[in-house]
Image (tube, rainbow, N blue to C red):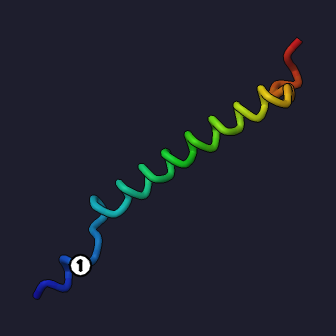
Amino acid sequence: MCLHRQSYTYDEAPAPFFRLMIFFWTIFTHALLKYNTRLKIPIQHTHR
């Protein structure tokens, strides 16, 4: 009777997953910005 409780519903499943995605994405972008400022690599090549 409680088998459906263990499976995730559409409201429960994506929320922690998207939070994890956003969390790692922010860390990834911040790390990229730090390395770009350290190595002084131009991100925008069309900037004049």
| Residue sitting at the far top | 48
Secondary structure at badge 1 equals helix
Give the residue at x 82% y 25%: 44
Label count reads 1
Q: Image check: 31 left or right of 27?
A: right
Amino acid marked by disc 1 = Gln
Does 22 sit above or below residue 8? above
> Which quadrant: the N terminus?
bottom left
| Residue sitting at the far bottom | 1
Does 27 sit above or below residue 36? below
In front of the other: 17 or 40: 40
Task: Pinpoint residue 6: horizontal percent, then vertical percent.
Answer: 23, 78
Task: Pinpoint residue 23: horizontal percent, then vertical percent.
Answer: 49, 46
Give the residue at x 42% y 58%: 17
In front of the other: 36 or 45: 36
Q: Image check: 37 left or right of 24?
A: right
Give the residue at x 38% y 58%: 14
Circle 1: is it few (<14), some (14-19), or many (20+) Cα within 10 Å? Answer: few
Task: Pinpoint residue 26: horizontal percent, then vertical percent.
Answer: 55, 40
The residue that label 1 is drawn on is 6
| Residue sitting at the far front | 38
Quarter occupied by residue 40: top right
Q: Image check: 45 left or right of 5?
A: right
> Which quadrant: the C terminus?
top right
